[in-house]
Image (cartoon, grey):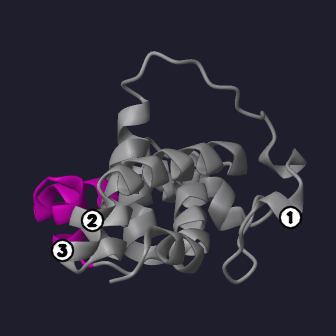
């Protein structure tokens, strides 16, 4: 059985990259990952014994991210993600605050951002995303459709005219 420390070292960077995609900045991503690791450590024997700690960790990470909006805390967010130091942003094929796709994704509402990040970044199916988010596959498709439509209108404002 894998120890928590082994899991954190092996999967931490990938989970941090997903957290950056979800939160839109490195500082909140690090906080999100830390909250996720605290939750995982608390229940590690059960998580490791279930045999799919990576899937469970991803679920905890996404649920933590979605629950942050329900918390009444105020968070400091930099107004310009490009002002973050580059070494603080984990990369996957050079995606970072200067990447146009990364910037666009960070403008979406949390659930739409989560669906698109899980679909296109983590390469999960609609059924897997639905299970992770605790909703139906049609809700996943609806959120993906709305998120992509929002991105299209940002990229091509004339697309909004056609949609009306």
Would residue 50 be found to the left or right of residue 93 on screen? left
Q: Vertically, is 84 above or below 125?
A: above
The residue lying toward the viewer, choosing from 10 and 149, is: 10
- Distance from label 2 to label 1 (Cα)? 33 Å
Q: Is residue 3 above or below residue 41?
A: below
Q: Main secondary structure of the magenta part?
A: helix
For residue 87, which numbered disc appears in the image?
Answer: 1
Q: Is 29 contained in the magenta span?
A: no
- Which residue is painted at 86% across and 64% down in the image? 87
Q: Find the distance from the CA under tag 2 to the CA under tag 3.
A: 9 Å
The image quadrant of residue 70 is: top left
Estimate the spatial distance between the alpha carbons at disc 1 and disc 3, rounded to whole Å.
Answer: 35 Å
Q: Which residue is mark 3?
A: 50
Q: Quadrant of residue 132?
A: bottom left
Tell me the magenta residue range: 125-145
Q: Badges 1 and 3: C-beta atoms under 8 Å apart?
A: no
């Amino acid at each position: 059985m894998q120890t928590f420390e082994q899991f954190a070292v092996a999967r931490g960077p990938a989970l941090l990259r997903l957290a950056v995609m979800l939160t839109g900045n490195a500082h909140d991503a690090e906080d999100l990952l830390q909250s996720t690791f605290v939750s995982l450590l608390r229940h590690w024997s059960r998580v490791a014994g279930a045999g799919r700690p990576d899937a469970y960790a991803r679920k905890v990470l996404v649920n933590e991210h979605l629950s942050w909006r329900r918390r009444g805390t105020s968070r400091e967010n930099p107004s310009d993600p490009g002002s973050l130091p580059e070494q603080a942003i984990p990369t996957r094929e050079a995606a970072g605050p200067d990447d146009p796709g990364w910037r666009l994704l960070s403008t979406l509402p949390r659930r739409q951002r989560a669906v698109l990040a899980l679909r296109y970044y983590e390469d999960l199916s609609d059924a897997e995303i639905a299970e992770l988010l605790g909703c139906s596959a049609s809700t996943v498709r609806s959120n993906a459709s709305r998120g992509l439509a929002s991105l299209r209108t940002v990229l091509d404002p004339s697309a909004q005219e056609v949609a009306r």
